[in-house]
Image: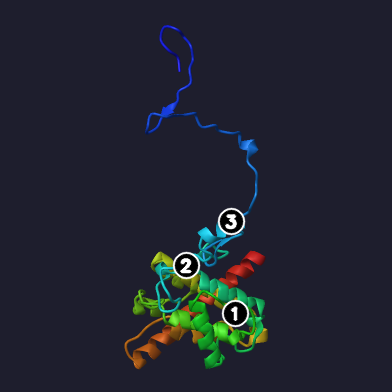
């Protein structure tokens, strides 16, 4: 700084406890930075690519607010973004990716045929610990667990929509406008689910699961009802509602391709 009267410039030093003085901190040039590691963060698996010396200090898995991935709200789960920008529980994206990789979209009766109970329970327990077995998981098991996740979602997927208004929908656009009234987290989740159902329906020639068949098997899992009669009656309306949404998604893709 400039000292009055002499015009000399002197360096400031900072006193620390005990009266000792420290030299000023040296700041290097940005070009001197070296790239020594490429570290990424996955919301389900945590930090990836950490240098060995840092691994003991940083947890390998991302923290979770819940010890289970079934029967909990999306707000308490680790989420990632799908290709459409929807925030979706990472466990659903993980099962979807494995389902697609194993050719599940073309498997006859996918989402309709029940999986082996023992395998489904074993895989469920592993998913709750944040692990999906590397191989040997039947595609019908994966499909069944995706449905189970929606069936056990607190509050139901579509229960915040008035049943009478669901019934009155006459087109995919009507359904989409009603879906816009869902809480943001559930609206994003429903959009992801409808795109999944549309992907299945697109392979109808192989899997025998057109849009109405897919909607039929998903509908009972998207709503909670107090008694069996009400559940059955409402499931029919939900099935029609989902069918229109699936057909709308299929038509949107055809329009984009043309």
Q: Report helix, strand or loop for mark 2.
A: loop
Q: CA distance from mark 2 to mark 1?
A: 19 Å
Q: Residue tagged by mark 1?
A: 133
82 w.r.t. 14: above or below: below
Q: Is residue 122 left or right of residue 98?
A: left
Q: Residue at x 38, y 67 (%)?
A: 183
Instruction: Pick out the residue farthest to the top.
Output: 5
Label at residue 169? none
Q: How is the image coloured?
A: rainbow
- Give residue 153's position: percent from left, percent from top: 41, 78
Identify residue for label 2.
Answer: 78
Q: Between label 2 and label 3, give the one nearer the viewer.
A: 3
Q: Residues within 10 Å of mark 3 (few under 14, many from 20)?
A: few
Q: Nearer the viewer, mark 2 or mark 1?
A: 1
Q: Report the residue at 42% width, 86% height from top.
A: 235
Task: Identify the secondary structure beneath mark 1.
Answer: loop
Comparing marks 3 and 1, which lies closer to the viewer?
A: 3
Q: Quadrant of the C terminus?
A: bottom right
| Number of other residues with Cα within 10 Å of mark 2, as a class: few under 14, some 14 to 19, many 20 or more | many
Q: Residue furthest left?
A: 226
């Amino acid at each position: 700084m400039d000292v009055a009267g002499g015009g000399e410039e002197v360096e400031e030093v900072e006193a620390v406890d005990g009266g000792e003085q420290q030299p000023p901190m040296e700041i290097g040039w940005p070009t001197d930075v070296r790239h020594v590691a490429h570290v990424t963060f996955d919301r389900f698996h945590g930090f990836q690519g950490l240098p060995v010396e840092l691994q003991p200090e940083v947890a390998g898995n991302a923290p979770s607010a819940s010890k289970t991935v079934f029967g909990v709200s999306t707000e308490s789960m680790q989420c990632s973004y799908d290709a459409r920008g929807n925030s979706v529980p990472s466990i659903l994206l993980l099962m979807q990716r494995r389902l697609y990789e194993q050719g599940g979209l073309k498997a006859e009766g996918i989402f309709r045929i029940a999986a082996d109970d023992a395998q489904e329970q074993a895989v469920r327990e592993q998913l709750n610990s944040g692990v999906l077995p590397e191989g040997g998981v039947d595609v019908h098991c994966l499909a069944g667990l995706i449905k189970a996740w929606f069936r056990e979602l607190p509050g139901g997927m579509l229960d915040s929509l008035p049943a009478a208004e669901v019934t009155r929908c006459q087109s995919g656009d009507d359904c989409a406008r009603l879906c816009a009234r869902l809480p943001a987290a559930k609206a994003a989740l429903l959009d992801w689910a409808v795109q999944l159902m549309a992907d299945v329906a697109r392979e109808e020639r192989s899997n025998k699961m057109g849009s109405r068949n897919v909607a039929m098997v998903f509908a009972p899992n998207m709503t909670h009802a107090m008694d069996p009669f009400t559940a059955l009656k409402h499931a029919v309306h939900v099935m029609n509602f989902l069918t229109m949404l699936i057909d709308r998604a299929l038509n949107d893709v055809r329009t984009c391709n043309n």
